[in-house]
Image: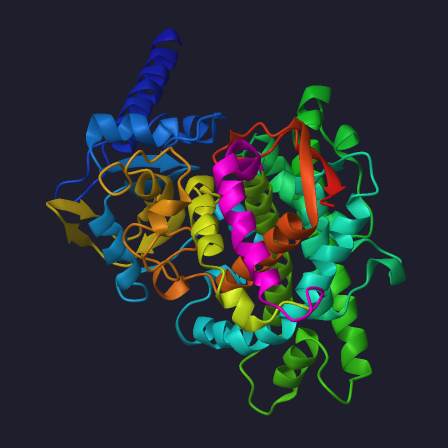
Amino acid sequence: MWSIALCIATFVIISIIQWSYRWRNPKCNGKLPPGSMGLPLLGETLQFFAPNTSSDIPPFIKERMERYGPIFRTNLVGRPVVVSTDPDLNYFIFQQEGQLFQSWYPDTFTEIFGRQNVGSLHGFMYKYLKNMVLNLFGPESLKKMLSEVEQTTCRNLNRWSCQDTVELKEATARMIFDLTAKKLISYDQEKSSENLRENFVAFIQGLISFPLDIPGTAYHKCLQKVEDYSNQNSIQTPENVFDKPREATATLRIFTMAVNGKNAMRMLKNMLKQRRAMPRKEQSDFFDYVIEELNKKGTVLTEAIALDLMFVLLFASFETTSLAITLATKFLSDHPLVLKKLTEEHEAILEKRENVDSELTWKEYKSMTFTFQFINETVRLANIVPGIFRKALREIQFKGYTIPAGWAVMVCPPAVHLNPAKYEDPLAFNPWRWEGLESSCASKHFMAFGGGMRFCVGTDFTKMQMAVFLHCLVTKHRWQAIRGGDIVRTPGLQFPNGLHVKILWKN
């Protein structure tokens, strides 16, 4: 009996050792980049998501760059990943989009967004949707939107000036969401029985939670319960579903995120159903344009893809821009000379007008040279997107290393933006470094808005919102920082205590 048990135990131990060895030493036809695959199943996920307060290259990346070089391998959320901080490999990846590489997201995220989410589409379908979005965020549309963006910004700043303090991140996120939702789907919170934005906020808060889908983990159980929620109208709360109170607490935020994401999608689906039942005679928002596309004979657009597109546009529109505006305001508070130069540029615009109170023109907007330098420097240091993921479609050789087919590749923008070989004193906030440089598109050394074929189509809209906000802020108001402003990266940018300011009239 003991001999049988000993044999079984020996077999199990040998199997575990062999499995662990294969995990740490993946098969490859050539030479893998140096690095570590971490613990079985976990990989180095815990280290990657560990919070840090540094504005430098994330410690996870910096430590491995120093140890292994600019290209190294790791394992994140159970997936082998080649991390690139090499400008040449980054450029190669973006240039070979659709041929050697394609867009990829960890399985844990696609479980939430759906397997057929817009970010996972490729080729013709992706180009088709991109052209649809450019119909909303292209130059001609932005020209028409400029006045509304300015009016919305001024109205909100005026209202905030009547309050004792305002938490800038939350306030700007609400402002941008309301504006975008109006342009996309004519949504007005005051006239709606349900709060669409609250569902998105809860979704985002859960999305930054630790996403490891392994049987037994909180995330895995949460996904199972969300699937149950999709199949019925009600579900037990996590406290009732999970065995241990601590486990319930750990999963509550993730559970709420997923359910609120589905609630938001349900609201969008109901809106689309109502709109298709009672179509408008003229286009007044992006929903009308989508419906027109859906009704075309032989259209490739499906209702599911259309809804997912709306979801992603709303999700992406307000969170990243509000983070950038909040950080920009913090930089202005910390750098008086930058504030002085920015204020001079915008006051000069007013001085050239016949009527000081007239609205911003497109010509005035395009003349904001220092403002765009300021925005570029802000997003360079913000590094709101800490990693851009792709997947190798076939085995690739680069600089003596082999990237196996099917492996994920992560381009690391912070390592590019904080490279001392390109940016002198890279941690210093210096908008003047952009003087005379082309800053309207992505390059080997600047990818705050992505790169290649998937360069963010909302870039110009984001820049316009930031520039208009800064114009209204420095020409009509001043502010005092009250509290908050601390930065944490997990690895994405967050303001855990917000940035609380007092908005005052300038005169």
Q: Is residue 412 left or right of residue 210?
A: left
Task: Indicate how the structure is coloured in the image.
Answer: rainbow
Report if residue 474 is visible in the image: yes
Residue sitting nearer the eye, 288 or 74: 288
**Picture coordinates of residue 198, whole percent (x, y):** 76, 48
Is 356 colored magenta in this rendering? yes
**Magenta part mainly helix, strand or loop?**
helix
User: What residue do we see at 64% from left, 65% from top?
Assistant: 310
User: What residue do we see at 39% from left, 31% from top?
Assistant: 58
Q: In this picture, is 275 found above or below 86? A: below
**Picture coordinates of residue 461, whole percent (x, y):** 55, 63
Identify the residue at the far bottom of this view.
Answer: 297
User: What residue do we see at 13% from left, 41% from top?
Assistant: 31
Q: Is residue 401 left or right of residue 4?
A: left
Is 242 colored magenta in this rendering? no
**Picture coordinates of residue 48, whole percent (x, y):** 42, 31
Q: Is residue 432 left or right of residue 67?
A: right
Residue range corresponding to the magenta coloring? 330-358
Q: In this picture, is 84 found above or below 134? A: above
**Picture coordinates of residue 135, whole percent (x, y):** 55, 77
Q: Quadrant of the N terminus?
A: top left
Residue sitting nearer the eye, 240 or 491: 491
Please identify the quarter of the rendering in which residue 103 is found. bottom left
User: What residue do we see at 71% from left, 83% from top?
Assistant: 283
